[in-house]
Each structure stands twice: as structure tokens, then as C-alpha cells.
Image: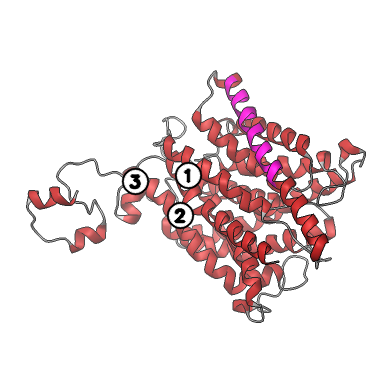
Amino acid sequence: MDGYYAFMLVATAFVLMMTVPALALFYGGMSRSKSVLNMMMMSYVAAAIVGILYVAVGWSMGFGGDGTFFANPFELLWLDGVTTDTYIGVMFQMTFAIITAALISGAVADRLKFSAWVVFVPLWSLIVYFPMAHMVFSCTEDSLICGRIGAQDYAGGTAVHINAGVAALVLVLLLGKRIGWPREQMRPHNLTLTMLGAGLLWMGWYGFNVGSIVFAGEEGEAFTERFMSETGRTFANTTLATMAAIIGWLLVERLIHKKATSLGAASGIVAGLVAITPAAGAVNLSGAVAIGLVAGGVCAWAVGLKYKLGYDDSLDVVGVHLVGGVVGTVLIGVFSTADGAGGVDGLLYGGGFGSLGDQTLGVVVAVIYSGVLTTVIALGIKYTMGLRLDEEDEVNGIDLVAHGESAYDLHSGTSGGGSSVLAASTAPATTTSKTEGASA
């Protein structure tokens, strides 16, 4: 077991890296230059808030016992009664909670108040994510999605991606469109950052999927055999589905727009990773490739729906995470095999429509639960402190308004402190140009 603990330490660190810095870079590069720091800050602040909250009550709500929607939040308050060797598992699940909240931020770029985000994140985690994690991951007899419905979800197609995608759609609809959208082109300001972020997400996702193996009292030779078999399957499936999704996305992009873009390749990576997340342990290699191809193509088409339907999903969270999560979760019912982690044959392997029905019902429950409760939370914030920036502040850019900084200091003669509020308040009243130049 010592090797398993070491493996889980690495997997946990990889998943944390998926939020900071990977998601921050991926979203930051896709943002406009006047909001890139805010976009990255939303990921970092989500990590800080959700991480502490998860240790306080999140683990207890998710894994503290039985319950249809969630377990007793006070049963394991602040991990009371949890042995220190279990802390690795707690930290691993904590990183899932962190990235799920952070994923939502991409949909609301440029216009959501930072203060509203700081309030939304803990409320949403408590009311929506922690219960959803229980329904999907705890797999007690009473837990709704895994236990009662029997839907398979290896690493979070419902709890993470569909959940975040639905929440993103709710916020987008309540916030409204960015000023000038879609009339003005709002292009990514730095695709190099986005490509780097996508690569780091791919790397970190091996912790996300491969680290999600769960043992039920197994030890010795049986433990070793299952560990090697299941981790090999999930690693290979994660890799192949992502590769296939890149191809699927670029093919559709080429057909629709006559170009195969770097942003399309980066988005295809994420779409494939999202779709294989719930199916990583359930399908064989050909199934993983099929899911990746379908997800890449469907998500490439789906991101264009915002222009037809009129919702301003800034960085395509709905088109990639909601749609990709639905594709991957439902297709388990088609491509799963009995020798996979769930032990269920899908439609393609003679299992009939039973698994497909379970997977579809699991998706429906996740969409309704997340949609209704996210709406309640968002409306509460909207009619108290407000969700959206003032028009003037949105035009000027949220980086300056919320953080007193700009990502790129393009003005000659400024000090190394840039435009930071703190730097400005502590700087001497007068400095010589020679000193300023030396600090640059």
C-alpha cells in the first residue's frame, strides 16, 4: 500500500495543478487583455475558499455517511475522527471540488463582480457541489445518482463537468451579454498561454482520471492485479480519447470555418478530457477513441450555438464542459464493457438499453439539481449585492476596477511596481527616472 499512497500524492498534486496554474493559464489566454488577471484570480481564489471549506464540511457532506443527497455535514466536521492516512483521499477529493467551481468562471469573463464571485463560490460549493459529489462518488445504497439510479461516473462527468456547465449557463443567462457582444470581435488576447494551459490540463488530467480508482478492502495480490489493470486502462483511455477529440474538433472546424486553429486544438484537448472523465474505467480502447471523436466534433459544433441562441458564454464553458460531459456520460451506455470498472455491457456489446437509460437519467438529475439550486443562489446574490459590473467599469476593464492592476505594463517610464494599488500607495512621492529604469 505504500506505493499506492505515493501514487495518490502525485495524483492529488496533478489535479491541483489543473486549477493553478493550468486552468488559470487556459482561461487567462482566452480572455481579453483587460480582464486576464481577474480571470486567473478567479481560479486562485476558488482554490483558497473551496479548499478550506472542503476540509471543514465538504468531506463530511460527501463521504461522512449515507443519505440520498448528502451526508451529515457535522459528522466529520474539520475531519474530526478521520485518520491521518485518510487525509490523502480527502485532499484528492478537495482538488475536484476546487476545479469544479473554478471551471464556471470562464463563462462570466469581463462582467461578473469579483465580490459576487467570492460570495458565489462558497455558497455554490456547499449547496450544489458537495451534495452532488455525494450523489456521484460516495456510492452508498441511498446516494441518488450512483446508488439508486446506478449510473456510472468514473471521475466526474456529472458531478464536475455537467454540474459546472449548467451553473455556467445559469450565470450567463442572469448576467446578460457583454457590452458589444456579439457585434464586436472579442478574441483571445494570448493563445500561447491558452496552449500552455491546455497542455498542463492534459498532464494533470492523468491524476484526475487515473487517480480515481477506488479499492473496497482489497489487498495483496488481488490489489496489485486490479491496480495495474485499472490504472493502465484509464491512462490509455484518457490519452487516446484526447487525441481523437483533437482530430474531431479540427475536422469540424475545418468543415465549418475552413480553418484548423490552435484554439480549436486546445479546445479539442479539453473536450476529449471532459468526455472520457466519466467513461475512463468503463470502456475499451476503441470505445475511448469513439467517445473522443464524437465529443470533439459535437463540442466544436456546440460552441457556435451561443451565437444562434443568444447567450454570451465568454469562454465556451457550456459548449465544452456541459456538452462534453453529457456526451461522455451518456455514451457509457453504448460503449461500456463488462470487464470495465462498472462491470456492465453497454448497448454495443449486447447489454441492451438498461445502462443507456441509467446514464441518461443520471444526466437529467444532475442538470435539474444544479440548474435549480444555482438559480436560487445567483438570484439571491443578484438582488442583494448585485452580480454585474457597472457599464463604465466593464468598459474600463475588471483588472483595473477590481484589482488595481494591469497584466501588461506597456508604458515606458513606469516603475517595476506596474499599476498595483499597493505599489502605488507605498512608492515614494518622487523618484528619479534613473532609479525607475533600474527596477524594470
Disc 2 + disc 1, Cβ < 8 Å: yes
Identity of the amino acid at label 3? Answer: Gly
Question: Residue at coordinates 63% horizontally, 42% vertically from top-left?
Answer: 273
Q: Earlier in the sequence, mark 2 or mark 1?
A: 1
Spot occupied by residue 438 in the image (x, y as percentages of width and height) = 14, 50
- 68 sits to left or right of 292: right
Q: Is residue 429 magenta?
A: no
Nearest to N terminus: mark 2 or mark 3: 2
Helix, strand or loop status at disc 2 = helix
Residue 258 in view of the camera: yes
Secondary structure at badge 3 equals loop
Q: Is residue 216 above or below residue 414?
A: below
Q: Nearer the viewer, residue 213 or 323?
A: 213
Q: Earlier in the sequence, mark 3 or mark 1?
A: 1
Question: Image height check: is 62 above or below 145?
Answer: below
Give the mark toward the camera: 3 or 1. Answer: 1
Residue plotted at (72% across, 57% down)? 213
Q: Position of residue 260 (x, y in %)?
A: 54, 23
**Which residue ends up furthest to the bottom in the rendered image?**
81
Instruction: Report x, y in % for residue 418.
Output: 24, 51
Quarter location, residue 336: top right
Q: Which residue is mark 1?
A: 27
- Could you tell whether 348 is left or right of 66 in the image? right
Q: Which residue is mark 2?
A: 42
Q: How far apart in space, not on screen, are marks 2 and 3 (Cα)?
A: 15 Å
- 3D distance between C-alphas at marks 2 and 1: 10 Å
Seen at 52% across and 41% down, the residue is: 198
Q: Is residue 237 magenta?
A: yes
